Image (tube, rainbow, N blue to C red):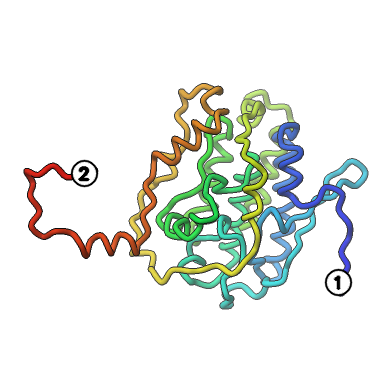
Amino acid sequence: MIITKFVEQGNLRNFINNNFITLSWLQKLELLQSIAIGLNKIHSSGLSHNDFHSGNILVSNEKSNLSIFISDLGISGPADRSYDPFGVMQYTPPEILRGHNYTKYSDVYFFSMLMYEISVGVPPFINVSRDQLNDLIFDICDGLRPIYNSKYIPKSFEKIMKQCWDDDEFNRPLISQLVDIIGNWIKEIKENNINSQFNKCEQQIRLKYPLYKYDIYKSQQIKTTDLGKEDFEHDDDNEELNFNENDSDEDIELNEDFERRVQNRFVKLTRKDLMKWLENVDESFDPNRSYPR
């Protein structure tokens, strides 16, 4: 039996859900730095976590100071060793979904999802339902990343977050580098730099979703695709998914409008459906005929 310390704030997902509106950017960065320091200790030991998400990070409030504990090290192990994919699909790196081995760079991708969650207030791909998760595997491998309103995220933060979720794992920074980068951001805020991007983005709009959707964010066996990287067309869809800078706050706050814009943007089509459709295409295609759309 393993006995762990009781943490008052629960896991990071619950903490963000309960406290996001009152969290300053300084507090968000301090949370991320504590997480990065903990993950760096794991990497310094030659290990990778392999199932890193907000449900596995515990938050304690000791003497009014927030403390972070990384839990669920059940599938952690030596980096580059082969493991059966297991975890929360919405956080899982594309290389793992393609059947490759976990590495320390996979953990950096996991960390990018935490950067997203702490900055936006909801887990990644919150708009994806349970029955769309299999399609999401192909979407992530094809370059899809969580959507957000760039108006409320500092440019320097956004740049690093995108580097961390780069499709090519070797383009991602080391976690030790992230510790230093986040430390510099914290220093910038504490020095009361009035030009700080973080001070300008202090006012936040949270994307609110029903709590019942959170129950799909649980670690489980992950299905992988045998498609290689070359099988996926790699457009930078994430750039196009950002909200328009001219959107009003009222537009962003409307959940129905938000979900409608996402749904209208894509038509979900599985590879199996596509192949079946191609097999049934009429070879005697008539260019003058009006086909249904």
For marks 2 and 1, give the CA distance.
Answer: 61 Å
Kindly indicate the quadrant of the structure image that contains residue 187.
top right
Disc number placed over residue 2 in the picture, else none: 1
- Report how many numbered discs are placed on residues in the image: 2
Q: Nearer the viewer, mark 2 or mark 1?
A: 2
Residue 277 spot, x, y in % from top left? 25, 60
Residue 162 spot, x, y in % from top left? 51, 47
Q: Quick one: 49 or 174, which is closer to the camera?
A: 49
Q: Is residue 246 left or right of residue 175?
A: left
Q: Is residue 35 left or right of residue 2?
A: left
Q: Quick one: 104 or 114, which is closer to the camera?
A: 114
Give the mark nearer the N terminus: 2 vs 1.
Answer: 1
Kindly indicate the quadrant of the structure image that contains residue 65.
top right
Q: Is residue 81 left or right of residue 74?
A: left
Q: Residue furthest bottom?
A: 82
Say which residue label 2 marks: 292
- Identified by mark 2, the residue type is Pro
Q: From where the camera sits, is residue 168 visible?
A: no
Question: Residue at (13%, 42%) from the top-left corner?
Answer: 290
Residue 63 spot, x, y in % from top left? 93, 44
Question: Residue at (57%, 75%) from the top-left corner?
Answer: 84
- Identified by mark 1, the residue type is Ile
Q: Quick one: 271 or 226, which is closer to the camera?
A: 271
Question: Residue at (69%, 53%) from the top-left corner?
Answer: 54
Mark 1 Cα-neighbour bin, 10 Å: few <14, some 14–19, many ≥20: few
Q: Secondary structure at mark 2?
A: loop
